Image (tube, grey):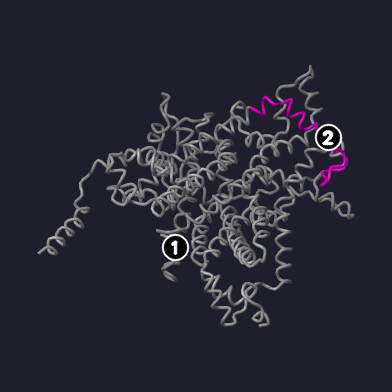
């Protein structure tokens, strides 16, 4: 009740002691979320001998760049995997934006003749799907996309959820008058979508694009099902393979060593952590800037019709 | 006179959409939606017909025909594939694991998310709150493969950080990947840890949307912070909470494959009964040479149960509180 005495803004603030406790709780949680990353980085720059003797330490005792030197020597494998990851991410994200926004725009048109059918068509996949096996059979046996990078791109390109986000956005933000006047000027629907609706819908494109980009970059599951060819591995599937078999990466020995000698000389422990770092850094550096789009996507998606 | 004409014209305009013929606009819109329509037919609807596989004994027909030809010419199995799956040793274990883990995940994640959002929204420094949110959002963007490396660094028996601490304090090192008793806790912890930032931010977004005058009025009436939370904030986030609950119920027969398979280290035999779910079972069956019909039966069972639970959850919500159903 004493809070009442204070004026204005501070009237409804929590007590300083409570505020301190809350800060402490979140500080602990936040550190818990970030520390594994620092830990893995610290292992990747620790000397291999020290790792073998002392185990993993939070603070590296003897610094070494041997893991990164090793990755540099294996750069053909790493760069090829990185290139595949980028290719899948870029092509997939663009395709995903195109597919989701075009359908979103179509179902946002109130007097479209097939609107009812389309609404049902989008609703059914939200509650029922054929299951993991049936999807696998479609991609693997019917489309025959095994070992083809389209197997990584197509299955994740679209979702009823993303289409709904687009539809809600177009309904609430794009004024009908703009579309009507464009129609009067003789623009077809394709042109209206591409040249009028999309340019003023950057926030929703960013949201859909970010969901897609992070989804593609982080995908290892599709790769583990469909890609066996080592030349078509993405970074995530390389990391996945290395968990099963650390020597996986050591396919091309250099400097006249036999494969056996080469494997023995490999800084195995720090190398696996170094690859994890190679994957995480692009994400960790970009997500704080794109976070707001995720949040807007979450809230837009939760607007029901 | 004039008004009569006007209303006549208006009536015609109102009636017009109903009688509307297929127009050029419709053709254009249809063509614009065609690529996505094809995507849905191939990747959403075609798998639904995969249901047939579950009722067949799939056999390669002589002559090198395609998959569909072989499938249609395979013998019917009736419910044979299903009864094989239901009577197998794994079925009860899979059902128990999948459902119990999901129930634990739903309860713990929802409490952490709502509690965290309430705390974040009442913090004095908005800047600090933003920094915490960003840091807690990080695990959400990591794939389970990457997280499995974090876990490996902590738990691997010879070099892991945790065993390092245990031995430094004079204890016996634990063979983490062979001791099944710890894994329910590890899995629940990791699931909470990964989704916590996302959940808090989701609820925080709906809390910041609440009209501040409600709180001002409450303060005037002498409501404490706890009373405000109970009477203003919680009712305001109820729609989002219920929506998330229904969606989570729809996933109760599914599991996050990466969590159960990657993080445990490809699900070693020692953890098989603790961490197997329908998804890991089906994945292993795809990778092995198990008869495709039996795998399809398991997969189909999972899909039907998911559909049933989401509809059931929505139905229950519609009975209690019709406003908040999502379908």
Residue located 70% across and 68% down the image? A19
Q: Which residue is mark 1?
A: B314
Residue A76 sits above or below residue B35 on the image: above
Q: Quadrant of the N terminus of chain B?
A: bottom left
Front residue of B152/A74: it is A74
Residue B160 sits above or below residue B111 on the image: above
Mark 1 nearby-residue class (10 Å; few <14, some 14–19, many ≥20):
many
Front residue of B100/A83: it is A83
Mark 2 nearby-residue class (10 Å; few <14, some 14–19, many ≥20):
some
Residue A105, numbered circle: none
Is residue A62 one of those drawn in magenta?
A: yes
x and y percent of residue A276 in the render? 70, 39
Residues rendered magenta in the picture: A52-79
x and y percent of residue A170 in the render? 40, 50
Residue B264 sits above or below residue A68 on the image: below
From where the camera sits, is residue B128 visible? yes
């Amino acid at each position: 009740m004493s809070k009442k005495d204070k004026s204005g803004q501070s009237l409804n603030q929590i007590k300083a002691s409570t505020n301190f406790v809350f800060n402490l709780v979140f500080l602990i949680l936040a550190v818990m979320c970030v520390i594994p990353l620092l830990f893995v980085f610290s292992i990747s720059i620790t000397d291999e001998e020290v790792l073998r003797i002392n185990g993993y330490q939070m603070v590296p005792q003897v610094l070494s760049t041997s893991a990164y030197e090793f990755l540099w020597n294996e750069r053909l494998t790493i760069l090829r995997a990185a290139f595949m990851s980028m290719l899948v991410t870029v092509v997939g994200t663009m395709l995903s934006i195109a597919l989701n926004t075009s359908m979103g725009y179509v179902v946002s048109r109130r007097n479209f003749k097939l609107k009812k059918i389309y609404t049902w068509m989008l609703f059914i996949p939200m509650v029922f799907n054929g299951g993991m096996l049936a999807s696998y059979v479609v991609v693997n046996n019917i489309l025959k996309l095994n070992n083809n990078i389209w197997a990584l791109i197509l299955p994740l390109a679209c979702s009823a959820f993303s289409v709904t986000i687009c539809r809600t956005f177009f309904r609430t933000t794009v004024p009908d008058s703009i579309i009507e006047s464009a129609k009067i000027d003789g623009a077809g629907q394709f042109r209206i979508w591409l040249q009028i609706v999309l340019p003023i819908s950057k926030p929703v494109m960013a949201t859909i694009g970010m969901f897609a980009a992070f989804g593609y970059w982080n995908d290892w599951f599709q790769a583990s099902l469909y890609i066996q060819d080592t030349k078509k591995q993405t970074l995530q599937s390389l990391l996945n393979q290395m968990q099963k078999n650390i020597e996986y990466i050591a396919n091309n020995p250099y400097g006249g060593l036999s494969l056996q000698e080469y494997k023995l000389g490999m800084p195995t422990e720090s190398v696996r952590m170094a690859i994890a770092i190679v994957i995480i850094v692009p994400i960790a550096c970009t997500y704080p800037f794109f976070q707001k789009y995720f949040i807007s996507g979450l809230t837009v998606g939760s607007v029901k019709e | 006179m004039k008004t009569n004409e006007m209303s006549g014209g208006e009536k015609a305009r109102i009636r017009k959409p109903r009688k509307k013929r297929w127009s050029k606009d419709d053709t254009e819109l249809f063509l614009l939606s065609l690529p996505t329509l094809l995507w849905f037919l191939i990747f959403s609807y075609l798998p639904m017909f995969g249901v047939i596989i579950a009722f067949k004994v799939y056999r390669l027909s002589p002559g090198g025909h395609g998959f569909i030809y072989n499938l249609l010419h395979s013998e019917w199995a009736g419910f044979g594939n299903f009864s094989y799956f239901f009577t197998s040793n794994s079925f009860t274990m899979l059902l128990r694991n999948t459902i119990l883990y999901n129930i634990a995940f739903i309860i713990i994640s929802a409490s952490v998310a709502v509690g965290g959002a309430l705390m974040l929204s009442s913090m004095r420094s908005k800047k600090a709150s933003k920094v915490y949110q960003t840091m807690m959002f990080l695990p959400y963007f990591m794939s389970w493969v990457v997280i499995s490396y974090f876990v490996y660094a902590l738990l691997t028996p010879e070099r892991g950080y945790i065993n390092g601490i245990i031995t430094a304090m004079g204890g016996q090192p634990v063979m983490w990947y062979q001791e099944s008793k710890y894994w329910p806790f590890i899995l629940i912890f990791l699931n909470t840890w990964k989704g916590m930032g996302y959940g808090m931010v989701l609820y925080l977004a709906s809390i910041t949307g609440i009209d501040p005058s409600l709180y001002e009025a409450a303060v005037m009436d002498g409501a404490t912070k706890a009373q405000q939370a109970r009477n203003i904030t919680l009712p305001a986030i109820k729609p989002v909470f219920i929506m998330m609950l229904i969606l989570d119920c729809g996933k109760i027969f599914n599991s996050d494959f990466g969590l159960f398979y990657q993080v445990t280290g490809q699900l070693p035999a020692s953890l098989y009964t603790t961490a197997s779910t329908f998804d890991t079972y089906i994945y292993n069956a795809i990778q092995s040479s198990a008869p495709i019909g039996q795998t399809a039966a398991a997969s189909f069972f999972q899909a039907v149960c998911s559909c049933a639970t989401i509809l059931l959850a929505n139905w229950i919500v519609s009975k209690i509180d019709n406003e908040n159903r999502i379908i």
